[in-house]
Image (cartoon, rainbow, N blue to C red):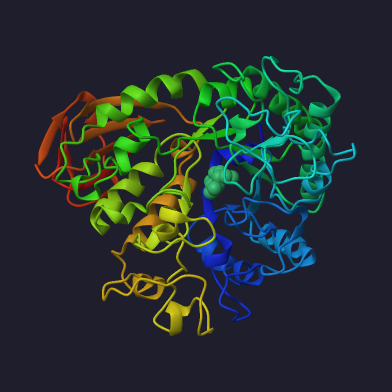
Amino acid sequence: MPNWLNDAVFYEIYPQSFYDANDDGIGDIAGMKAKLDYIASLGCNALWINPVYDSPFKDAGYDVRDYKKIAPRYGTNEEMYDFFKAAHAKGIRVLMDLVPGHTSDQHAWFLASKKREHNEYSDRYVWTNGAFVGIADHPYISGMTEREGAYMLNFFASQPALNYGWGIVTEPWQSAVDSPEAIATREAIKDVMRFWLDHGCDGFRVDMADSLVKNDDDRKHATASIWRNVRDMLDKEYPEAALVSEWSNPYSAINLAGFHMDFYLDHWHNGYNTLFRDYEPHPEQDNSYFRKESDGDIRRFLTDYLPKYGRTREHGYISMFTCNHDTPRPARTLSQNELKLAYAFLFTMPGVPFLYYGDEIGMKYLNLPSKEGGYHRTGTRTPMQWNHEKNFGFSKADDIYLPQDENKDAPCVSDQEADENSLLQTTRKVISLRHAYADLQAGSSFDVIYAEGHIFVYKRGSLVIGLNTGKEDAVIEKDVFRGRTLLYQIGNPEVQAEKLSLPAGSFVILK
Ligand code: NOJ
């Protein structure tokens, strides 16, 4: 386990929307480099960067055409290698996004695979043995290639599934997980990982990490054993490199597959969902814990979270995020004050937290037409709002990647820099406390002291934390409050002997 993860706070950058340094309307590597000081000023010491590889961008870059080439719109490979160095010089590690389950249908492997003649890549993807032979329970395409067969899709129509074999082989065209072709795919992905790690990258966020082996069992044991093999490689060759999975089953991802971290994804009615966006499809009916008007109850989160945390805490970390490029932004339903409480919670919980660019100022979710396969996700991917210059300082171009917030109260970094009570400054302060107190970091102990409705009191190491996200004031009496003083607060909480008063909308850390 890389030690640095214990004190890591990640910032996710959607590169096309972060900062445009060459004024062509789209964010780039030079733009990320120019903003490293800003990222460091947030207290973020690690990055997850969405795919920057060469791609036709039918799925915003998750359709990789060449794993080893930077997309020209972002810059060059040399610029990326230099970016790793520049980030390291400021104490920031960089995870790239690894997309192991599928490629673009324009990837050279697939162009070879769809040829009629048998070749080295014929079995790199999942193909049936006839144009009229389909794949039960899976999406596939046939009738589009000179090769006689149908190929399986992993996501959109442009994303054919790579072949890691089948958990149970029932058809003659299915590969076993230990077949030479399935192993060749695994080794090809390890080769991609080594390529970037050798150039200075610090690890990977792994896209659809649970999706590799088809018809795997419930726990996804066969897929997990592929990742175990990858983890062994990292432990031997790159012990400081980190892996975070898009899996959302921490027992399988961490204990079985060997990921260092697993994302707690926004799945309808799981614990995470009840905290931040409990509303699909009606945001106006959001019943999440952090909305003061909701009847949200912290126990809905804890019932789901505690068993997951308990089973995995010795082996790795659960990662919670403010949002990611696939979910609506939290500001869609939460006010700036509610967001302060939400982030104060998120950055004082165990595990490794992730902040999505723009959430630190409460950027809004916008209702926009789809761009590059974004569909409803597009509204979370708009260009960063830096200041009051043209395009909020994102770019000097006339035409930019996506429209920006046109509301009068659209937040921006420069306004919030100037206001010590802003969401931005609150976020910075809480993250700085996390760095200052080992008790608040990923691996320190976590115990629930009191949890009912909107009131949540918990212990991290020797610190006690109290949160009231509701609209009623509360007073909690516990011996554990005796002799304690306020280390940090939002709102006006007070502690006196064994009484902790938590007014509506308040947060406190007691030492
Ligand atoms: C999950 C990614 O986060 C998402 O953006 C992408 O569209 C799919 N995987 C397919 O790669």
Residue in the foreground of this view, choosing between 180 and 268 = 180
Residue 8 in view in this figure: no
Side (left or right) of 401 relative to 230: left
Q: Position of residue 484 (x, y in %)?
A: 26, 36
Residue 440: quadrant of the picture: top left
Residue in the foreground of this view, choosing between 497 and 63 = 63
Q: Say which quadrant the N terminus sits in.
A: top right
Residue sitting at the far front: 132
Residue in the foreground of this view, choosing between 72 and 472 = 72
The residue under the point 28% across, 73% down is: 407
- In this rendering, the count of numbered labels is 0
Q: Say which quadrant the C terminus sits in.
A: top left
In the rendered view, tell whether residue 383 sits above or below residue 243.
below
In the rendered view, tell whether residue 433 sits above or below residue 153.
below
In the rendered view, tell whether residue 66 sits above or below residue 123.
below
Side (left or right) of 174 relative to 112: left
Q: Position of residue 18 (x, y in %)?
A: 53, 67
Residue 30 in view in this figure: yes
Residue sitting at the far left: 472
Side (left or right) of 316 relative to 504: right
Q: Position of residue 75 (x, y in %)?
A: 71, 69
The residue under the point 27% across, 28% down is: 300
The residue under the point 56% across, 34% down is: 261
Residue in the foreground of this view, choosing between 308 and 100 = 100
Q: Position of residue 482 (x, y in %)?
A: 22, 30
Side (left or right) of 135 relative to 452: right
